[in-house]
Amino acid sequence: MSWLVRQVRTIGCLCVLLYCAGALVAPAQEFRGALRGVVQDARGGRVPAAKIVVQAAESSLGREASSDTRGEFRLDDLLPGAYRCA
C-alpha cells in the first residue's frame, strides 16, 4: 500500500513541476503593440487605399500601411514608444 501512495505522490509532484515549467516558458504579456484606425475625409467619408506612415519619435524606425476598401488600417508589432505621423 505504501508503494501506491509513493507512486501517486510522485506523479502528483511531476504534474505540478510540469505545470510550473510551462508557466515559465510561456509568458502572458506581449511587449509589442499595434495601431489601428480609420482614414476619413473632412465630411466623414472613409478613404480607401490611403497611405499611412508612422515614425518613432526617438529613432529612425518607420512603418507604412495602406487602408483597405473600408478605409481601415492596422500596424502590428510596434515597439513601445512615442510615434508621429510622417
Image: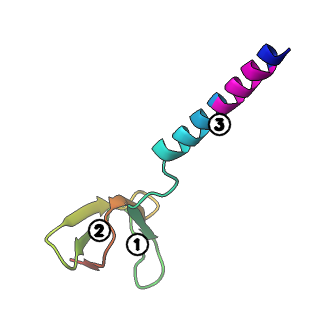
Q: Which mark is residue 52?
A: 2
Q: Are marks 1 and 3 in contact (CB under 8 Å)?
A: no
Q: Are marks 2 and 1 in contact (CB under 8 Å)?
A: yes
Residue 41 lies left or right of residue 64; in this view the side is right
Mark 1 → mark 3, Cα distance in angstroms: 50 Å
Q: Amino acid at mark 1?
A: Val
In this rendering, the answer to whether 6 lies above or below 35 is above
At x 73%, y 27%, the residue is 9
Q: Is residue 71 magenta?
A: no
Q: Are marks 2 and 3 in contact (CB under 8 Å)?
A: no
How far from the left and from the top, in percent, is residue 38? 45, 70
Magenta-highlighted residues: 5-13
Which residue is the site of mark 3?
Answer: 16
Q: Amino acid at mark 2?
A: Ile
At x 49%, y 46%, the residue is 24
> How dense is the environment of label 2, judged by Cα within 10 Å: few (below 14), some, or many (20 and up)?
some
Give 36 or 18, whichever is nearer the viewer. Answer: 18
Label 1 secondary element: loop
The quadrant holding residue 74 is bottom left
Q: Which mark is residue 73?
A: none
The quadrant holding residue 12 is top right
Say which of marks 1 and 3 sits in front: 3
Which residue is the site of mark 1?
Answer: 39
> How dense is the environment of label 3, judged by Cα within 10 Å: few (below 14), some, or many (20 and up)?
few
Q: Is residue 10 magenta?
A: yes
Quadrant position of the N terminus in the picture = top right
Mark 2 → mark 3, Cα distance in angstroms: 49 Å
Tell me which secondary structure the magenta stretch mostly adopts: helix
The quadrant holding residue 86 is bottom left
Q: Earlier in the sequence, mark 2 or mark 3?
A: 3
At x 52%, y 53%, the residue is 28
Q: Earlier in the sequence, mark 1 or mark 3?
A: 3
